[in-house]
Amino acid sequence: MLMNASQSTQTFSREMSPMNLPRVLLADDHPMVLEGVARLVEDFGEVVGKVEDGRALIEAASRLIPDVVIMDISMPNLNGLESARHLQKLLPHCKIIFLTMHADSAYITAAFEAGASGYLLKRSAGSELKQAVKTVLAGRQYVTPLILSGDDQLRDPLGRGAPTFKQLTPRQREVLQLIAEGHSTKAIAILLNISTKTVEFHKAKVMETLGMHTIPELTKFAFAHGLVVK
């Protein structure tokens, strides 16, 4: 008999592993980064899976029921921010830590709004990752001291204050990312299991909301907001 996501998560929270280690799922589009982070995690947790894009992350999380997900913001097919929103609905008790190179205030704010419990920079993973996992599992938030101390400048990539993509619906953001990644309307329809007319509708609404008129404009916007892997 299958357990629902909440029941499953509670079970693994009590019985994380035979050695009482947290079950950790990793997501990053760079295999070398995944391997490096996995080696760090193995000192204090059980790596239950490694994936390279957002949609694979959602599928793996639904099967593996991790206690913690450590992921990048910029990932193909579905970026980290949208993945986090899906994870919050799928596994509300799972802790999400963003491990990224983005120190921009827009990304940090968006990450916690999407459901993150932790945020740290890749260059500080070796010294901070264990503490970050321990902190979020204790029910607290973790933000790298590099950002809190001002060692990295917090900046808005477009100089517009709050990120404009917040005005888009989750589906519109998914369509925007896939358009910027170069997928055709037909390919997007297949990937999202919607009609081509619905894809065109979402594309038109995105353009209207953002005040843009061309695919290059949408692509530039998506890159600027970390929706597309650079």
Image (cartoon, grey):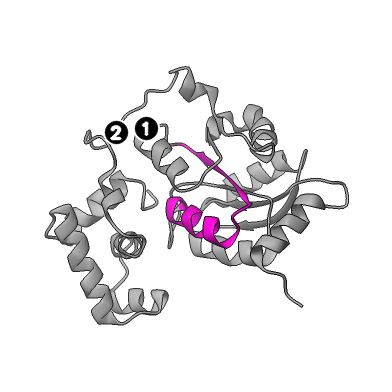
Q: Is residue 40 above or below residue 222?
A: above
SS state under label 2: loop
Q: Nearer the viewer, residue 12 or 175?
A: 12
Q: Position of residue 160 (x, y in %)?
A: 21, 36
Q: Residue at x 36, y 46 (%)?
A: 226
Q: Secondary structure at mark 1?
A: helix
Pointer 2: what residue?
Answer: 156
- Closest to the observer: 114 or 104? 114
Question: Which percent across, then down, holds residue 85?
Answer: 47, 55
Q: Nearer the viewer, residue 49 or 204?
A: 204
Q: Position of residue 87 (x, y in %)?
A: 54, 57
- Choose top left, top right, bottom left or bottom right for residue 193: bottom left
Q: Which residues are magenta?
A: 80-101
Seen in the picture, residue 70 relative to 136 is either above or below; the reply is below
Residue 16 in view (yes/no)? no
Instruction: Name which residue type carries label 1.
Output: Ser
Are the residues at dot 2 and dot 1 in contact (C-beta closer than 8 Å)? Answer: yes
Task: Please determine whether, in this image, residue 163 is positioned above or below residue 170.
Answer: above
> Is residue 195 placed above or below 87 in the rendered structure?
below
Residue 98 visible, this orientation:
yes
Q: Is residue 94 magenta?
A: yes
Which residue is at 64% across, 42% downward? 37
- Chain-order first, disc 2 or disc 1: 1
Q: Is residue 1 left or right of residue 106?
A: right
Residue 48 pos. (x, y %) = 72, 56
Checking the image for residue 228, the label placed there is none
Q: Is residue 130 magenta?
A: no
Q: Residues within 10 Å of mark 1 (few under 14, many from 20)?
A: some
- Write down the residue under mark 1: 105
Q: Residue at x 24, y 49 (%)?
A: 221
Specify the amino acid type for callout 2. Asp
